[in-house]
Amino acid sequence: MQEIHLTAQSHNSVIRCGQGVFETYAPKYKEGQFFIVTDSNVFALYRHLLWETFGININIKILPAGEKSKTHKYLFEILKEMLNCGMRRNCTVIAFGGGVVGDIAGLAAALYMRGVNLVQIPTTLLAQVDSSVGGKTAVDMCGVKNVIGTFYQPQEVLADPRFLETLPEKEIRCGLGEIVKYGALDGGIFAKLTENKNNLKDLRFLSEIIYRCIAHKAKVVKDDERDLNGLRKTLNMGHSTGHALELYYGKKSHGEYVLIGMYFELFIARKLGICTGQYAEELKSLILSVIKKIPYYADLEKAADYAKFDKKNNDEKISLIVPKALGESTEIKLGLEEYVKLLKECGGGL
């Protein structure tokens, strides 16, 4: 087991990683008042574990699985249920699930009685390496991702690789999308990934890389918790284009769209002379080792419209975080017309 102490401006978090952290640290929360938020898929897999750990008579909200639950409707259902269960200000909200559960449960914890304790127990690879850490909470609205939210740090994150054993391959690819992103931001992670390019889905390897990704994010969040100096923006590499394609086309997972977004944005960086040479080829190869094939998208103009609503934009231009060199990235801003033109030039092939 390994620990990372995230010292943020608003609140400190302790992130515990490794086999056995759930059994070691989760049971202590049954001694106080707690409320669990999970989804139907996770509850079907782990209801007996929840009962064994927290008791049969638990206060729990089970959301329908998937992004469709990440709305103000379900947010207020959680808050109403917490009120009906008599939750007080010293209670703890336990987010037990993937990224959707973590985001909406975190926002509920931030809002209920102006803020109660929050614990993240991520059960997907994506949530373990990324979304459970750093305090971003949100729901979607009107087809725009994460438009209603706040920064609210969990007091504890329990990232136990035991939960990865039940994930389907698509969910592993989803998490690898964020892991490859960290590789593009951190030279040490990139080297580890390229050395193990044919072994990326091995659970033992993933257990090791989770800690390194969390450590990178924790350092970024410590220095720029609220996206004020541009450092935390780097964590959105691939997300501007990935979110736009995800919102317009759907079907694939968030992490797969991050990989596809990185592929398009790497093309743009190469086209503009920002990222060239052997590193660009190696990063392209790493992306394709996970996603295998980039789909052809016929309606890129319509999909690109969604990029206009990305939170990184602070003017009329599209903000992209693109790779520059090993362990380096940079922000570029493109007008919508130029952005669409470059996406079309990529056309699914670098």
Image: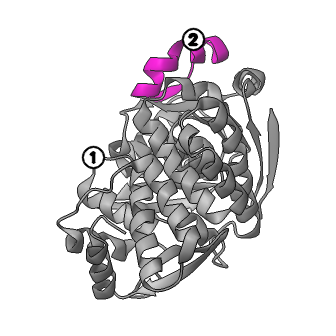
Q: What residue lies at 46% left-to-right and 42% top-to-bottom?
A: 173
According to the picture, the residue beneath numbered tag 2 turns out to be: 56
Residue 34 in the image: state x and y as whole percent: 64, 29
**In the rendered view, does 133 fall on the left or right side of 267?**
right
Q: What kind of secondary structure does the magenta stretch mostly adopt?
A: helix
Q: Is residue 263 visible?
A: yes
Q: Residues within 10 Å of mark 1 (few under 14, many from 20)?
A: few
Residue 203 in the image: state x and y as whole percent: 60, 30
Which span of residues is magenta-colored? Answer: 40-61
Amino acid type of the residue that numbered disc 1 sits on in the rendered structure: Lys
According to the picture, the residue beneath numbered tag 1 turns out to be: 251
**Local SS, label 1:** loop
Amino acid type of the residue that numbered disc 2 sits on in the rendered structure: Ile
| 56 shown above or below 207 | above
Residue located farthest toward the front when viewing the structure as drawn? 278
**330 or 105: nearer the viewer:** 330
| 16 shown above or below 245 | above
Tell me how far mark 1 sits from mark 2, CA to CA: 36 Å
Among the two numbered marks 1 and 2 on one chain, the one whose residue lies closer to the N terminus: 2
**In the rendered view, does 153 fall on the left or right side of 12?**
left
Q: What residue lies at 62% left-to-right and 44% top-to-bottom?
A: 196
Q: What residue lies at 73% left-to-right and 32% top-to-bottom?
A: 18
Q: Residues within 10 Å of mark 2 (few under 14, many from 20)?
A: few
Q: Quadrant of residue 327?
A: bottom right
**Local SS, label 2:** loop
Q: Quadrant of the C terminus?
A: bottom left
Is residue 156 covered in magenta? no
Q: Quadrant of residue 93?
A: top right
**147 or 250: nearer the viewer:** 250
